[in-house]
Image (cartoon, helix red, strand yellow):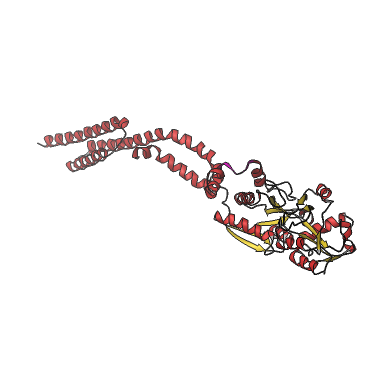
Amino acid sequence: MKQFLRFYGAPIAIVLLGLLVAFLFMAPPPPKKVVIAGGAAGGAYAATAESYAKALREQGVEVEILTTAGSVDNLAKIKAKQADIGIIQTGLAADFGSEGVRSLGAAFYEPLWVFHRADAATVELQDIAGRRVAIGPEGSGVRALATLLLTEAGVTPDTYTASPLAGQAAATALKAGEVDVALVVSGPTTNWIADLIADRNVALLSMREAHALARRHPYLDEVTLYRGVIDLAAILPKDDVTLIAPAAQIAVREDLHPAIQSLLIEAAFREHAGGSLLADPGRFPTAELSDIAISEEAQRYYKNGPSFLRRIFPYSVANFFERAWVLAIPLITLLIPLIRAAPPLYRWRIRRKIYVWYNNLRELEAAGRAAETAEDRTEVRAKLADLQAETGNVEVPVSYTDDLYRLRAHIRFVAELVDKLSAQERHARI
């Protein structure tokens, strides 16, 4: 080990210094805390946010979940940098903008349900004209989507009475007869969706225009709610129902660290890839339905899957190596010549020390020859003894032993010369 350090100690020290300097320029680590804009308490968005938060926390990331009014509020919070992540309904970007926001892909279907009083014949969207309609509050995702589809069907806002109710409140108002139609956006497992389907006084519109709407709007998809899929024992629904569905997409700040993005996509695959009541296995997550630009990290992930390092190492280790790999080329470039230079450098260091001793020896020889008194020669002789002792304690490789022993012999030669001069002076005095 001592021999190894003599050879390579200097190159290793230079490389370590280079690493220290390089770390200063390395890409920053992922944040220790992120904020997720979830949705209304008890809703599908809130449940999804909790699922993603659990996945992040398992990797040591602190997560705060905000309760919000829904998609539009989530989008606004991400744009305002009040949240890093949010669940957002597809189709909103055109109306509300997506500057500073990127999508990691759609995660699950969130159909538009058109429930109506069973005693009011409703077979197509045009039949909604003239009725009291729960369409969601101003600025909500459900209101934006419902208004768009109704307007395209020729049912303009001035032809019906709009109510700002949404979700559970809209379902309650429909059952109570306070509204004639409720247009709501929600997942199929929500309790009040099953409750409305089971209510004999309420009917669910099967949207025959769903295929046409999906062709007109890429962020929408035609889905089928199969007979009995909600409750097989009660056969709910009684028949297959065609629905038009936007999707819930994972939106993030465009500057969110790629490592956090990868963790979110991994969580989305674990949560949604197995399929649902409306989607076949493998349908989600997907980049197909997003109306917000897909992030570069998400594009790479959908194309290649998890990174090579992520498949091998835990998140924290893989993330460090992924940030540090860019330093490998300059460090290797630095290391190779240093390794090659180590033996010559070591030889130079050994020989330089010997040459320094030779300089000292030459000075002592000159001092010994020039000494005029016995005391001066005694002092020179003592210094030569010290030099002899110093060189005697030095360890050098075998290949340099001849240089060292030659130096010791020369020290002895000068010592004998000084002794001879001293003896001559003594004889001269006699």
In this picture, which residue range is highlighted in magenta? 304-308
Where 407 falls versus 115 (above or below)?
above
Residue visible at 73% across and 46% down in the picture: 288
* Residue 401 belongs to magenta span: no
Depth check, front residue: 44 or 74 = 44
Residue 353 placement, left or right of 243: left
Relative vertical location of residue 423 with respect to residue 261 in this rendering, above or below: above
**Place of residue 286 in the rendered image (x, y in percent of width and height, measured from the top left):** 70, 47
Where on the picture, by quarter, is residue 176? bottom right
Name, please, the residue furthest toward the front.
Answer: 233
Note whether residue 172 is visible. Answer: yes
The residue located at (34%, 34%) in the rendering is: 351
**244 or 277, nearer to the observer:** 277
Residue 20's x, y, as percent?
A: 49, 47
- Number of marks present in the image shown: 0
The structure residue drawn at horizontal position 69% and vertical position 62%, both measured from the top left corner, is 43
Image quarter of the N terminus:
top left
Going by the image, does 343 lie left or right of 59?
left
Quadrant position of the C terminus in the picture: top left
* Residue 85: % across, % down: 66, 56
- Residue 87, image x, y percentages: 69, 56
Residue 324 vs residue 424, the one in the foreground: 324
Front position in the image: 421 or 30: 30
Relative to 367, 44 lies left or right: right
Q: Is residue 31 visible?
A: no
